[in-house]
Image (cartoon, rainbow, N blue to C red):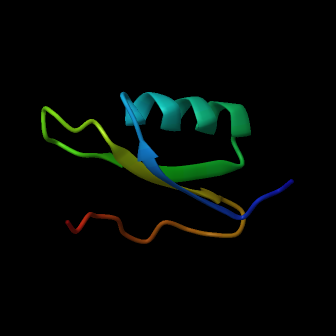
């Protein structure tokens, strides 16, 4: 579908695993950032994935 931006929330159990798996499936045209909560009881996370030919990551960070 050549999606430009993908926003994911409430990634459960292992957010980094699901993020990496999706990036691998999308191929080298995509990049992004993924953040998991740091609490021991809540393994939820979020991710933003984007097309590298249309967007450039200028900075990243999190605000809770």
Q: Is residue 64 above or below residue 21?
A: below
- Can the viewer see residue 40 in this picture? yes
- Nearest the camera: 34 or 12? 12
**In the rendering, at what x and y percent does residue 46 appear?**
41, 51
Q: Does residue 48 appear left or right of residue 45 in this picture?
A: right
**In the rendering, at what x and y percent does residue 4 appear?**
72, 64
Q: Is residue 60 above or below residue 19?
A: below
Q: Is residue 8 above or below residue 53?
A: above
- Can the viewer see residue 34 in this picture? no
Q: Does residue 61 appear left or right of residue 34 in this picture?
A: left
Residue visible at 20% across and 66% down in the picture: 64
Q: Total number of numbered labels?
A: 0
Q: Residue at the right extreme?
A: 1
- Nearest the camera: 48 or 43? 43
Where residue 23 sits, quadrant-wise, is top right
Residue visible at 22% across and 38% down in the picture: 42
**In the rendering, at what x and y percent does residue 62 appear?**
26, 64
Residue visible at 70% across and 32% down in the picture: 25
**In the rendering, at what x and y percent does residue 51 appear?**
68, 59
Q: Residue at the left extreme?
A: 40
- Nearest the camera: 20 or 14? 14
Q: Does residue 17 appear left or right of residue 52 in this picture?
A: left
Residue visible at 57% across and 29% down in the picture: 21
């Amino acid at each position: 579908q050549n999606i430009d931006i993908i926003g994911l929330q409430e990634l459960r159990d292992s957010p980094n695993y699901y993020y990496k798996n999706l990036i691998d499936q999308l191929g080298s045209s995509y990049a992004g950032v993924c953040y998991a909560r740091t609490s021991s009881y809540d393994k939820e996370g979020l991710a933003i994935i984007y097309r590298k030919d249309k967007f450039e990551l200028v900075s990243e960070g999190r605000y809770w």
